[in-house]
Image: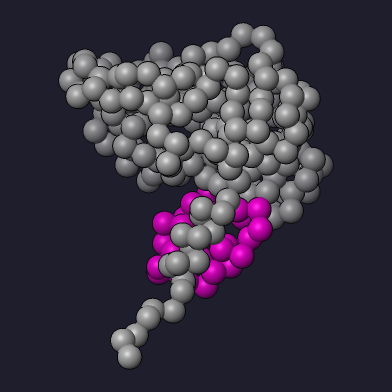
Amino acid sequence: MTIGDLNPAVRLLSIQVGLPQRLGGTGPSGATDRPWRSGYVKEPVAGSVWLGRTNLVGDGQGNLKVHGGPEQAVLAYAAAHYPRWRGELGRPDFPHGAFAENFTVAGLDEETVCIGDTFAVGDTEIQVSQPRQPCANISRRWGIADLTARVQATGRTGWYLRVLKEGNVASGLPVVLLDRPCPDWTIARTHRVMQGRRRDRGAAAELAACPFLSPRWRAVLAEAVAPEKTEP
């Protein structure tokens, strides 16, 4: 795929932000959960919002050991997945931001986004750094025990972005592809290789060498393909 092949109608449909808060009690399904602290719950933003190196204004993460930072400044999710989820979960009102994404994007998904893709949105330039690794908070947020596993199995994970140029963004803006240095490494393929990194060490080694992949993922892959140490 060349840059010119990408759908020119790709747009930022909505922006969601949320600061860490105490969650728990009775969830949407009626199930109860012990209290927990997370920035998972995101609410839509109207108008322009500033995107800095590590997050949008008004956004934050509860556990900075595994979330946030410059390699995970923005979480993006395909708008096209929502009709499927609404049908499969029987929740017609399942909203944008349900998967804690900051950007809900039309015209892109895990099969068409690649590691290293650089996009212009408003005043900003953003670059794809890694797939989203689904965590237990997805199930916990919605009180659906197998939802995290279903996100993993379907590959509808979303993807993270680093910020190359700070600036203002707003919903409705076009998402313009500026560069695609790694057309072979779609988010979908990257996700599959990471999941099977110990089975296909060759692919894992190739992915570990990708300079546009986040350092954390490169380290995990490198460890998986490293020669096993033998006792002297």
Q: Is residue 80 left or right of residue 147?
A: right
| Left or right: 142 in relation to 193 | left
Q: Is residue 226 above or below residue 38?
A: below
Q: Residue 145 occupies which quadrant of the picture?
A: top left
- List the single residue furthest toward the top: 46
Pick the residue in front: 5 or 104: 104
- Give residue 98's position: percent from left, percent from top: 43, 23
Decide if residue 31 is on the left or right side of residue 125.
Answer: left
The answer to whether residue 186 is seen in the rendering is no
Percent of width and height locating residue 213: 60, 53
Q: Which residues are magenta?
A: 184-213
Residue at point 35%, 31% (across, down): 138
Residue 89, percent across and down?
33, 25
Give how far across and how far down residue 218 sits, in percent.
54, 59
Residue that protrudes farthest toward the front in the picture: 232
Task: Residue at 52% x, 73% y: name it.
Answer: 202
What residue is drawn where x is 59% and y is 28%?
Answer: 55
Direction bottom: furthest residue: 232
User: Is residue 179 placed above or below 158 in the rendered structure?
Assistant: below
Residue 25 appears left or right of 166: left
Q: Is residue 12 magenta?
A: no
The type of colouring in the image is: one colour
Residue drawn at the location 60% of the way across and 23% of the way down: 56
Res. 166 visible in picture = yes
